[in-house]
Amino acid sequence: MNDFCAASSPAQRAALAQHQLEAIAAQEGVIHAFTCMDPAARGEDSGPLAGALIGVKDIITTADFPTHYGSPFRDNEGPRIDAWCVGEAKRLGAVILGKTVSTEIAFALPGPTVNPHDHARTPGGSSSGSAAAVAAGFVSFAIGTQTAGSTIRPASFCGVTGYKPSYGLLHLEGVQAISTTCDHLGFFTQSPRDAWFMTSATLGRAEVLQPRQPKRLLHVRMPGAVPLEDEMRARMDALARALPGVDVETVELPVPLDDFAGLQPALCFWEAARILLAPGRMRLAEGLTNLLQPYLEMDIAPYAEARRKRARYQEQFTALIAGFDAVLLPAALGVAPVGLANTGDALMSRFWTPLHVPAVTVPLWRAGGLPLAPQLLGALGADRELLQVAQWLFETNPSL
């Protein structure tokens, strides 16, 4: 399906929206991307996002729909107000079609959403409904979040673009806090060009992005101890050799594996325990309470050390990317796993998210009919430049 930017006239946008509503009528009963929706919802007739259908993750508050935070407890309903990102989308003309499925409080308990490419497989999490809604052709844009890998991984599993902006680029007002230093908004779209169009529109300068061929890319190869699927490892190595005119330098992962896997949880869980287990906040399933309770009782020293480590790694990343247009690495360990009880491993995003740098999934490949994708990382604040490179890679799509 064409991306939203390709629908440049009101008539083309209306036709795209009608096609999406027809797809919802035909498939939502199986995909289960939404917790609630209003197919008759309307937006403003003007604005850069006029006519765009948008889904909003169920940890983000909306005035027109209830917010239940992916919770099994129906009394966990949030205020009926628009989060900043929702209000901006409306102001720009978008149609807020409904709320998309989230795991419980964006942690581990999955919802009913299936992967549009194989209904026996997970769409990923925690932004499961947002990724699936774009992949199934239900909406042009879906808003999600990422605290570990909740945008990049489901985008890879579902074969769409997932974009996590630089920390602080977009406001989080109205988004349920999980980890104050790791939480980010995330956008799901058909292309990197669409991702930047929505982002730039919310920043007041809607821009149709032009692709830009990079001069230099840094390919971070994962060591054998990282359980990449063979197909993903082979595709990444082949991609690093298949970009004519681009100088690709390959390095081994420059981070100890313990920190690669453990830095983000050390930060996130300590912060989440104090946010989510505060008296009177909300009811949590027993499993999530049991996961977080030890961190509530933990001394601050390990958390403080994790913050010091993050500061050092942020400096190291700045030095690592200097002279390169982007960093190239897998978006996930492989294709979406079978089963809906587990949303897959966020290892490929977990370390980079607390470094606050922008990341984007570039949907390029299929393996046995299932999506498989690389991701690109950019320097902090270089979001536009990163998405230009991502759009170039998306359009080039080298044959491997």
Image (spheres, grey):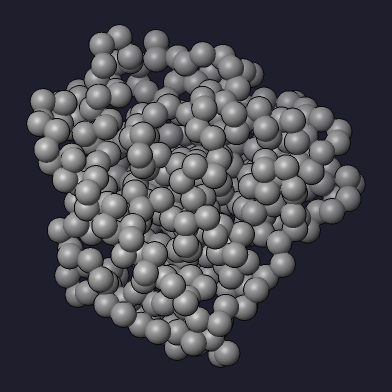
User: Percent from the top left, x then y, of residue 180?
Assistant: 36, 34
Q: Residue at x 15, y 58 (%)?
A: 258
Instruction: Please indicate whether residue 345 sits to the left or right of residue 37 in the image.
Output: left
Q: How many labels does the image show?
A: 0
Q: In which quarter of the image is residue 304?
A: top left
User: Percent from the top left, x then y, of residue 325?
Assistant: 52, 73
User: Percent from the top left, x then y, of residue 28?
Assistant: 57, 38
Instruction: Please indicate whether residue 178 sits to the left or right of residue 142 in the image.
Output: left
Look at the image and tell me in which quarter the N terminus lies: bottom right
Q: Which residue is drawn at 68% across and 34% down?
A: 89
User: Percent from the top left, x then y, of residue 307?
Assistant: 24, 45
Q: Residue at x 63, y 66 (%)?
A: 388
For residue 384, above or below residue 301:
below
For residue 127, above or below residue 278:
below
Could one spot residue 7 in this view of the protein? yes
- Of 207 and 29, nearer the camera is 207
